[in-house]
């Protein structure tokens, strides 16, 4: 009997980071981030050198950190979102802001954007954004902005030529290669990503890291 092919999901930190680092698939992710934040990240640098530890199992699971001038964009893939996960993500925003402090009294003004892809369903909306704002004057403290995308709100949206953003988001909820192709139909950039996911399914090294990540996340989620 032929062994069933491992399904590699876009929800995985391992997958997300691997594809994002590859220029072949940057159009897909650039479009996705811009559709959510209205920020063009095509000339942002993936902040990789400092974060990489040399441990592939760890480094594959790091989420995305993009830097350009005085802006930092953190992209988090939350496959098993929980209150503790979201609290951790907010702490990460504050940590990035704190790194704006130099020695002495010098301060670099940094604007931090965090984009959370959450595998959960919101009862009313597909996307939300958060800032700190005074209740009376509506004045914002413009240090950071957090975007939450509720991926289950986009489940099973098939490409019709005019809904690329929603279809891209729906791909994250797919659970088979057949479903991915049904959703993507003939959209070029999505199909390139899907072809690579199928190739990754037979990559033993990345597959082992992927399987380990999913197991660890399930155990952590169960513990909470």
Image (tube, rainbow, N blue to C red):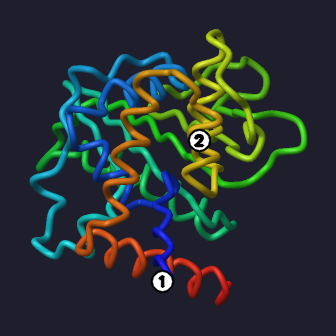
Say left or right for 42 vs 165. Answer: left
Nearer to us in this view, 174 or 98? 174
**Total numbered labels placed on residues in the image:** 2
Nearer to us in this view, 106 or 17? 17
Q: What element carries label 2?
A: helix
CB under 8 Å between discs 1 and 2:
no
Tell me the tag on residue 141. none
Extreme residue toward the right, this view: 123
Q: What element carries label 1?
A: helix
- In the image, residue 93 sits, relative to residue 168, either above or below, namely below
Give the residue number, with chain letter if any, for mark 1: 216
Pinpoint residue 149: horizontal percent, then vertical percent.
Answer: 64, 40
Q: Which residue is painted at 58% across and 43% down in the image?
A: 180
Pinpoint residue 21: horizontal percent, then vertical percent.
Answer: 23, 44
Pinpoint residue 92: horizontal percent, then vertical percent.
Answer: 42, 56
Q: Which residue is painted at 25% across and 42% down in the image?
A: 100
Extreme residue toward the top, this view: 162
Nearer to us in this view, 66 or 19? 19
Say left or right for 62 vs 31. Answer: left
- In the image, residue 136 sits, relative to residue 80, either above or below, namely above
Q: How far, Cα to Cα, is label 1 from label 2? A: 23 Å
Nearer to us in this view, 96 or 204? 204
Q: Which residue is painted at 59% across and 41% down in the image?
A: 171
Between marks 1 and 2 in the image, the one whose residue lies nearer the viewer: 2
Quadrant of image for the C terminus: bottom right
Which of the two discs, 1 and 2, labels the residue nearer the N terminus?
2
Tell me the tag on residue 171. 2
Pinpoint residue 181: horizontal percent, then vertical percent.
Answer: 57, 38
Say left or right for 28 vs 84. Answer: left
């Amino acid at each position: 009997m032929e062994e069933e092919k491992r399904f590699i999901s876009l929800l995985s930190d391992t997958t997300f980071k691997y594809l994002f680092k590859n220029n072949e698939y940057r159009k897909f992710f650039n479009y996705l981030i811009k559709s959510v934040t209205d920020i063009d990240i095509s000339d942002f640098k993936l902040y990789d050198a400092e974060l990489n530890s040399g441990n592939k199992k760890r480094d594959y699971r790091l989420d995305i950190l993009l830097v350009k001038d005085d802006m930092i964009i953190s992209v988090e893939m939350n496959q098993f979102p929980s209150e503790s996960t979201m609290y951790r993500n907010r702490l990460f925003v504050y940590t990035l802001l704190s790194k704006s402090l130099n020695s002495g009294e010098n301060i670099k003004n940094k604007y931090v954007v965090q984009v959370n892809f959450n595998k959960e369903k919101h009862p009313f909306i597909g996307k939300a954004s958060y800032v700190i704002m005074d209740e009376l004057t509506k004045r914002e403290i413009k240090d950071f902005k957090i975007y939450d995308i509720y991926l289950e709100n986009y489940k099973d949206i098939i490409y019709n030529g005019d809904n690329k953003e929603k279809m891209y988001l729906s791909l994250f909820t797919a659970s088979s290669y057949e479903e991915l192709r049904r959703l993507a139909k003939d959209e070029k950039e999505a199909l390139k990503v899907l072809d690579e996911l199928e190739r990754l399914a037979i990559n033993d090294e990345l597959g082992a890291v992927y399987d380990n990540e999913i197991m660890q996340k399930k155990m952590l989620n169960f513990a909470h």
